[in-house]
Structures are given as structure tokens and as C-alpha cells.
Image (cartoon, rainbow, N blue to C red):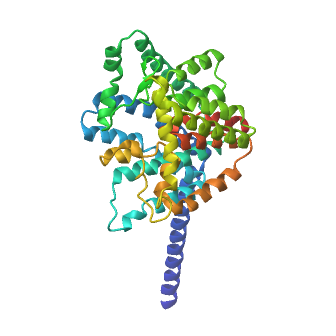
Amino acid sequence: MSLNSNSVCAERGAVGNHITNTSVATSHKRSDIFINIFRSTYFRGIIDKLLFYHVSFAFLLSNILIAHFGGNQIVSLSILLVRDSWVLTLTIALLLRRNWQVVGFLTTAFIFGCAPAFDPEARFVTTIFLYGLRDVFLIGFVYYIIGHNNFLSHKNAFNIFILLVLSLALLQLTLQLLGLDQLDEQIFRTDQYFSSKGVVSNIEGGILGFRLTAPFYSASLLATLFILVVVLTDFKWVYKWTLSLASLFTVSKVVPLVVVAYIFRRHMIVAAMGIAIAIVSFYLYLQMYIDSFEQSIFTFHAASMLDRVNALSALGDKGAIFGYPDLLGSNSILSAVLLGLDPSSAPESMIIAKILDFKWTFIFVAFFVIAAYKKTSSEKKFLLFIFFAISILSGLSNHPICFLPFAFVSKKAG
């Protein structure tokens, strides 16, 4: 009787172990399936497409919504948060492709950027921090698409987007040529857009009075996108000439900067030295003679250039580099606006603003940037040169939308 009982127990135990082992094996199999799905080329392609649409069509739509329905500050802020949530999509894309170098860079920037949160005397403003973090993620986005050989596999969607943006820009240009400023405001609601964000529009200094900004509400963003499409993509020459003409009406200093950098892309040191010498020479000339000029478009943009170069002197101020890091985004123009300070006191330079934020810890952040630059192929390094040149001399070309044309060089060079 005991022998039978033992044998029954043994059989039951064997069956139980078999069921347990089968369950564990099934569980592992399911987890492996999910892991394989997430790591699959198809799924990563979906995330890339989502990232593209997020920084292009969604960005365009959000601007239109803010301009027409952003009268309520809560509504406007909600739209802005959705618009800038592309940083989450980029994070997923980086993790799926195991781009640990860029992930390490963003993590380091995040840690040092929020360091003031541990200082009881420091003021932590979430909105300022998030906008500062977004600028850092822009650097990560540029490295991502440069290192990605097939980011714009959906080229037709990009072409449609560019033609849509160009059509809206030409519509505003036509209204300006016809002197229909009131109709221009009714369609694009430029004043409403800027007031919804709590800032005053600064679009004066255009050839026709106001600079071309639609549909991005930023002359710098529009000019950067258009001129990069001209020099980097294989658009038909008719479109390229039209884009070039439209970029001139933005009166953005980014246009000649990109053209010079592209022409001397195989001699980047020469280009950097030439640009630096030209800026310093023009700066000294303006310092001596700008007061003798009559008010005009030239003096308007000359004064703007003086302000940008003067911002570089902020690095020489006592305590600017050494000391406890500031909250990420604290030295931006947006921060000055939100805190009720004079925006002209903030450097109109994304890179300079970030150096002032990080202070001496910028060395650690720069380490990843330099390491990734060295890892970049020689065919693509000039793209980083263009990006950092723009970012040093401008604080407004700060959205992924204007650097999407980089993906075309990545595709050809890869």
C-alpha cells in the first residue's frame, strides 16, 4: 500500500514539475517573442516614422492650433507639451537601437541639469528645465539621424511636408507683397501665437516690413529648413530656386552661414576660421560706425548681430563657468521671459546658454559630444559642423524640424 502511495506521489510530483517547467518555458517563450518584436526592424521602423511625423506634421499642426485656439494659457501649454513630447519618442528610438553613447550623453546632461534641485536656495522652475532639456535632446536627435542610414525611408512624406510648408510660406509672402497685412493676421494669427506663449513677436526687419515666418512662426526655423533642403537634398531645381528665394525673405543670418559652411565642407577648419574672422571684422566695423548709420533694415540686423556677439563675452564673466551649475534652461531667452527679466540679457545662442547652465560640468557633457563626433564618418562630420555653427550663433533654430534634411546625407553616405 505504501509502495503504491509513493509511486502515485512520485507520478503526481513528476506531472507537477512537468507542468511547472512547461509554464516557465512558455513564459520565457512569450517574453522572448515580445523582446524580438521590440528589437525587430519593423517595429523600429514604426518608431522612426512616428518620430518623423511627430517633429514635422504634428509640429506644424500644433503651431496652427496655438495660433487659433491658444487664447487660454492652459490650452496653449497643453498643446506645447504634446508638441515637445517628441523627446519621449526619441528616447524610445535610442533605446531600441541601443545607441548607448547618445543615451549616456542625455543622461549625463539630465543629471547635471537638475543638480540645482538639491540646492535648497535654488529656484526650480519645471517649465524652464523642460525647455532646457529639449534643447539638449535636439543635439541627441541630430546625432541619431546622422548615425542612422535609413531614417527617411518614407521620403515621399518628407517631400509632401516641404511642399506644404513652402505653399503656406508663399501664401504669406503673397499677402505681404499685396499689402494685405490684416488678412495675413486673420489667416496666420501671428500676434495671437506669440501672445499665447507669453512673448512679444520680434518679426520686424523684413524686406517687406515683416519677416517671413509662416507657418513655423519663426524666421530662423523656416530659413534653416529651406536652405538645408536646397544644399542637401535632391529636390528639383525649380523647388530649390523657390526655396532659396523664400529663405531670403526670412532675412535670417543662418542662410549665408549654411551656404559658406557647405561650400567649404571639405575644409571645415578653414571654414571655421573664415567665419570667425568675418564675424570679428564685421563686429569691429559695426562697433565703430553703426551710430552714424540711418535707421534701416541693415541697422536693425546689425544691432541684432552685435547683441549675439556680445553674448559670447558672457563666458568671460566672473562665475560664469566656475561655480554650482544653474538649472538647465536658466540662461535661455525663454527663462528671461518667464521670470519677467530683460530677454536681451540672455545669450541668443543655444550652445552658450547651455555652457552657462552647466558651468564647469559642461566638460563631462562635451566629452560625449566629442566622442560621438570622432565616431561619425568623415562624409557626415560637416553636418555636425553646420549644426554646431548654427547653434553657437543662434538660439532660435532649436527644433528637429529644421535639421531633418541631414537624413538625406546620412542615407547617401551610409
Q: Residue 159 placed where, x, y %?
A: 57, 24
Name which quarter of the figure residue 203 lies in: top left
The residue sitting at the left extreme is 72
202 or 141: nearer the viewer:
202
9 or 301, nearer to the observer: 301
In this picture, residue 302 sits left or right of residue 340: right
Give the left or right position of residue 303, taking residue 268 as reference.
left
Q: Residue furthest bottom?
A: 2
Residue drawn at the location 36% of the way across and 47% of the way down: 336
Q: Position of residue 66 (x, y in %)?
A: 33, 32
Q: Is residue 155 visible?
A: no
Number of numbered markers = 0
Closer to the camera in the image, 7 or 97? 97
Q: Is residue 243 left or right of residue 234?
A: left
In the image, residue 289 sits, relative to residue 8, either above or below, namely above
Q: Could you say where residue 217 lies in the image, as x and y percent from the top left?
A: 41, 29
295 vs 48, left or right, is left
Query: Which quarter of the rendering shows the C terminus?
Result: top right
- Determine the residue positioned at 54% across, 76% down: 14
Camera sees residue 338: yes
**Image position of 346 with respect to 264: above or below:** below
Q: Where is residue 290 drawn, in percent x and y?
A: 49, 31
